[in-house]
Every structure is written in C-alpha cells, then in structure tokens.
Image (tube, rainbow, N blue to C red):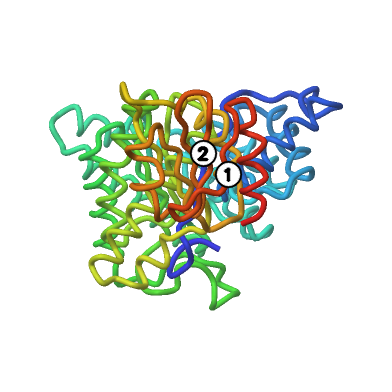
Amino acid sequence: MVGGGYPVVIQTMWKDRLSFSDLEGKAGEALVARIGGLKGMGCGLLRFAVPDTEAAEVLGRLAGMVSMPLVADIHFDYRIALRCMDFPVAKIRINPGNIGGREKVGAVLSRASEKGIPVRIGVNAGSLPPDLRKKVEAGTDRALALAAAAERELAVFREFGFRNILVSMKASSVADTIRANRILAEKNSGERPAGNPADDAGPGNDGAGPPLHVGVTEAGPLVAGVVRNTAALLRLLENGIGDTIRVSLSDTMENEVIAGREILAAAAESAAAAGNAPGAARLRRRGVTIVSCPRCGRNGFDTHGFTERWLDKLYGLDKNITVAIMGCVVNGPGEARHADIGITGAGDRVLIFRHGKALRSVSADEADRAFTEELDRI
C-alpha cells in the first residue's frame, strides 16, 4: 500500500538485463537470494527495465519466483506493457514523453484496470513531450514543464476513469526535482488521491493528491549521488511530499537501499524534532542503526574493513538496535555507550561492549566470530 498515511516505500532498480538463463540453476538461486537480501534490507519495490517482449517474458517468470513486488519500466512500445500485465507484476511505469498517443495509453489503462495493476506516470526531464521540450529550450522553467507533463497525463488517465495512479517527475537537478514535486503536490492538494476505486481504504485517501515517487535521476557515483538525493529528498519528505523514493546511484542496489533508509531516518528525526509525530511515524523504519568513527592516527581497529564486511548483513537484520564500530579507546565504549552492541580494539585485541560495558576481549582473528555470538544474544 502506497500513499496517504502508509509508510514511505524504498525502491531500487535492477542494474543489468536478465535472460532466461539467469533464472535457471545456481544462477537463479543466487538471483532469488539477492532479491531476498534486498527485501530484508528494507527494499519494498524492485523495478526492471523492460525494453522488449523477451525482457517482459523473463520478468514475468521472475515475478512468479519471488515475493518482492516487481515493477515493469516501459518506454516507447505500449505493447510491452500489455504483455507484462499477463504476469503478476506489481506496477507498470510508462513515460508520457515517448509511450505514444491517447489510444495507446488507453489500451494500457484498460488492461491495468482489468488486472488491478497500478500505473506510474514517470516524467523525465530528458524525455519531455516534444512541445514541452521546445518550450524548455526556449526558456520555460524545466520544473514547470515537468509538472505540466504530469498534469497532462493525469488528465488523460482521469478521462479514462483510471484512478490507480502514482506520479514521478525526475530531473538530475536538485532544484528542479524539488520545485516540480512541490508544484504538483500543491495543485492536487484538494483532490482525492489515487487508489483502487473499489477500496475506500486504498492508498493515499487523505486528500493529498496522487502518491508521488521522488528521487533525483542520474545523480552520479556513490558520494555525489547520495549528497544530491539527500539534498532533494529531505526537503520534500520534511514537507510530507513523497510516498516512494529511489536513491539513484552509479553504484550497487544495496547501497541505493541503504542510502534510502538513512535519508528516511534523517527525515523522521527531523519530523519528530518539529513535533510532527504522524510524519515521523510515516518515515520511520525498524532496523539497525550503524554508528562508526571515521578512523584516524589513533586507530587500533580496522573500522573500515569491519564495516565493509558487515554492512549488508547488519542492514538486513530485523533488530531495532544501534551498532557502534569504533577505532580506538578514545571513541570506543565511552562515546558509544548508547549503542546496544559495539566493537573496538587496540593492538591485537578487540573489545566487544554493550551500553558502554565490556562484554569480552578477544584476538583480532576472533573478532567476527565473537561479534556474531554477542549479536545473536540480543
């Protein structure tokens, strides 16, 4: 369920094209396990590019192999969207800038209505409808053009009586991303949002407009991409704008999910500090919080190596705890005494502690095993 008072959902997108051979044997087992790992880390939706009918067939088979809701991302050919909906996909994304005219959109919406599948109107700054693209080239504000493209497609969907809608307006510019989403949110603030018309308890029924999927597209490599997405998403989420998010990175899917979790955690903290309890509850996630020192010349424990080894596993745990990974006695148990479990070291010894109190001291070679044992006791 997406929208309204429901929790904000984290998305990521599969990075490679899949073939049928990827679904077979040990490759298929590894693929399903990785998707399960993403789900355990907090990913709620996984999107796949579907450039042709073969990709649609592969996605259709995969959808029957996993519990993760899968989303089909369609450009150019509406018939691919129709084929995807023969399978248990969770959502269809179409781009109004290249999917075709009213008749083709109508065919997609008719099938989606029949199958009960939501459709995301996905507007991109780089593929606006031709007339709006020309206006931007002539000096029209890009954020206004993004919002106009979304409103235009929303009007078409409404004419067909289709209400199970989500909207995204993405740009590589932080400012354009913020402004476009604010414009659409303000213009639709008095309208009953998208949801299954047969279900009055459906997503988004709080009078706040259609659910919005937000993120900065083509944001760059890990550090640059996290910074740019954080700058945009915090501003939007703090104002109650955004029902699903994706942190687009030239990096792994796992790091996209981790970044999304941390952005939601920061937004929840900000909302709570501002006295917005409902907003904080919509943003907050159960799971591990990691605090770790940056390391310096005092370090006696390889915080970088330990964090890298444990990162995905810790974010995949269903434990609402704080884990501290500290480099020396200065910022070990003392500065991290709030942590439910922590690890630090000096020389060839490693100390594992809880709430500032030492649990055990072991050799560096035994650090991972001992940490696992203490973590399992929580």
Q: Is residue 264 above or below residue 56?
A: below
- The C terminus - image quarter: bottom right
Residue 352, x across and y down, in percent? 53, 43
The reply, left or right, for residue 107 in relation to residue 307 is: right
Outermost residue toward the right?
A: 25
- Residue drawn at 41 percent across, 60 percent down: 283
Q: CA distance from mark 1 to mark 2?
A: 6 Å
Residue 220: quarter of image: top left
Outermost residue toward the left?
A: 139
Q: Amino acid at mark 1?
A: Arg
Q: Which residue is mark 2?
A: 351
Residue 106, x across and y down, in percent? 54, 51
The reply, left or right, for residue 164 in relation to residue 133 is: right
Tell me, yes or no, whether the two marked residues, 1 and 2, touch with CB atoms within 8 Å.
Answer: yes
First in sequence, mark 1 or 2: give its number. Answer: 2
- Residue drawn at 42 percent across, 50 percent down: 213
Secondary element at tag 2: strand
Q: Is residue 218 above or below residue 63?
A: above
Q: Amino acid at mark 2?
A: Leu
Foreground residue among 241 and 76: 241
The circle on residue 231 is none
Foreground residue among 376 and 185: 376
Residue 58, x across and y down, in percent? 74, 32
Q: Which residue is mark 1?
A: 360
The reply, left or right, for residue 231 in relation to residue 55 is: left
> Dot 1: within a 10 Å radius of its alpha carbon, few (fewer than 14), some, or many (20 or more) residues?
some
Outermost residue toward the bottom?
A: 200
